[in-house]
Amino acid sequence: MSLSYGRLLKKVVQLSVSRDSLHFFSLQNSAGMTLTRKIINTNNAPRPIAPYNQAVLLESTLYVSGCLGLDKDTMKLVEGDVGVETRQALKNLGHILTASNSAFDKVVKTTIFMSDINDFVAINEVYKEFFTKDYPARSAFQVGKLPMNARVEIEAVAGVGNIKTICCH
């Protein structure tokens, strides 16, 4: 049974003890059913630069915050063209997916924000290195400005657990 987060959740019922960078929340929907919300943070990806988490897992749906092309050690954007920055953003996304027991082939939706729509072709070339078949749904937008003057930011929604893809091929 698929549950809609916005439709079913009514209140936070309980905050459990933090453990291994995963914060567990119990949520209760209108039918009294308890759902689990985990806060995901990994040292293998850059730490958040504002008040947000790298990802939040609600039951088996993972919501990954926008990833920039940051070096996790220096917290600076990697040097190079937009392709280099995109590759690093997707590597960071991959580390978060791995920390959440997910993977690129379990991503169902991505959103790409770019500072220049003319970079779209270069971003797509790198994107195809990470998403190789049965691509996720996607939206892409040119925006006025990205954090830290980044050229690209990528967020994702993914499944966790056993996922079976049925496709039109």
Image: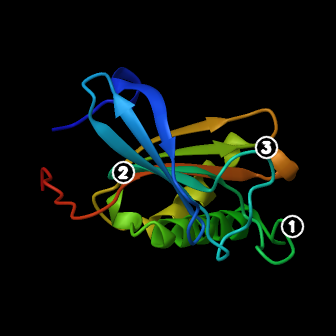
Percent of width and height locating residue 25: 48, 47
Percent of width and height locating residue 136: 36, 51
Residue 146: mark in rendering: 3
Q: Is residue 61 left or right of residue 128?
A: left
Mark-to-mark CA distance, 2 and 3:
23 Å
Q: Is residue 118 left or right of residue 156?
A: right
Instruction: Name which residue type carries label 2.
Output: Pro
Residue at image x 71%, y 70%?
84
Task: Name the residue beneath numbered marker 2.
Answer: 136
Q: Earlier in the sequence, mark 2 or mark 3?
A: 2
Label 2 SS:
loop
Task: Name the residue beneath numbered marker 1.
Answer: 76
Residue at image x 15%, y 38%?
1
Q: Quadrant of residue 19?
A: bottom right
Image quarter (top left, top right, bottom left or bottom right) of the C terminus: bottom left
Instruction: Name which residue type carries label 3.
Output: Leu
Label 3 SS:
loop
Work out whether residue 72 or residue 29 is closer to the camera in this orientation and state it.
29
Percent of width and height locating residue 85: 72, 65
